[in-house]
Amino acid sequence: MSLPDEEHRQSQAWTWWKAWQQVKAGAPRSGKMADEERQELVVSELIKYCGPEIFDALCADAVGRVFCRLVVVVDYKRMLGTWGGDLSSVRAGVRRALHTELGPRSINVAAHVGTAVAAEIAIRRDERIALLRSQKVKKLLPDLLEAQSHNRRNAAVFLDHLTHRQRSNLKVLLHDQLNDKPAIYIRMDREPDNAHMWLYWYLYHSEFALPENKRKIGGIPRDLIAVRLGDVRTNKRGEVIMPLGPMFAKVFDRQKSEMNKLGLRPKNPGVNKIAESLGADHGSITRWLKEDQPMLNTWSDGKGGVYYDFTLATVNRNIEIVKGQKRGPKPKNT
């Protein structure tokens, strides 16, 4: 924008501002236009002449844009920007500015309008975040699915502003809709196409992406097995029982046998040693070792060590074992 254009824009903004102040002061009206219509006309003209300042206000509040349903578009090649969406918050911000007294002629009306728009968006943003946090996740889920179908960035903003309890409850709700098993496998480095799965993936991914969590575990894991909250068990001390404890009990038992064959350790250190390694009690380990482990394969490395692999079916059965659930009847041969 050239200097003359800038001077014209500021001058027009002041002119329209002053016109409304005169209406407020009781100046004679001409024509049949009601004062409410006059105000809306002034608002529209100020939006036109205060465009750069309003644009800057929108750019400065990315979260506010999402909650107020506003968008900004930037053409970086031509260094131009515009905005759109639901302009009710912008117009309310300009009205807010109109009802604030200005000082001398040197006051920058356009800057004042931009500040008022920013304040209005911030107020509406905080009100809508409070409303979001007051709702049950069952009521929120349809809106979250709708948001992610149009703009996943917006859906991410909504998810980021849920309370801890809402995030936990939403994980359980999504898990139940995705799978009736206690565990779900998530490939963390790939955004799922399925809408429900994307919300589920983002809830976990955004938590692992927090700087403090990345420092603890050395980054975001590629593979994650998410266990439904209600399927996690604790011991008498309130400590979480390892969901894969039964599987590792089998692996440790196999390793004990391999080491005994090579004379690398005293024979039969007993169940208590396995219990100590897994933080479980003797009775649990004894029971776990008797349970069938579907799709768990172990094999010796010839040096006293053990390799093993497993599938999601193994994980789900392990969780059932920890919970004390018996395996369902095997299908009969027909």
Image: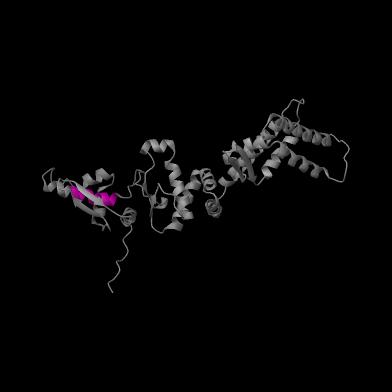
Q: Main secondary structure of the magenta part?
A: helix
Residue 270: where, in percent of width, then height? 18, 47
Q: Where in the figure is residue 170, as x and y percent of width and height?
A: 48, 51
Give me the residue at 59% from left, 42% from top.
73
Please give left or right for residue 175 compared with residue 18 in the image.
Answer: left
Q: Is residue 206 left or right of residue 41?
A: left
Q: Is residue 264 magenta?
A: no
The magenta span reads 245-255
Horizontal and vertical percent position of residue 182: 38, 55
Number of marks present in the image shown: 0
Whether residue 258 is visible to the viewer of this picture, yes or no, is yes
Q: Nearer the viewer, residue 67 or 54?
A: 54
Of residues 232 and 176, the one drawn nearer to the viewer in this rendering: 176
- Identify the residue shown where x is 74% and y is 32%: 8
Task: Tell me the quarter of the image containing the N terminus.
Answer: top right
In this rendering, does residue 130 appear at all? no
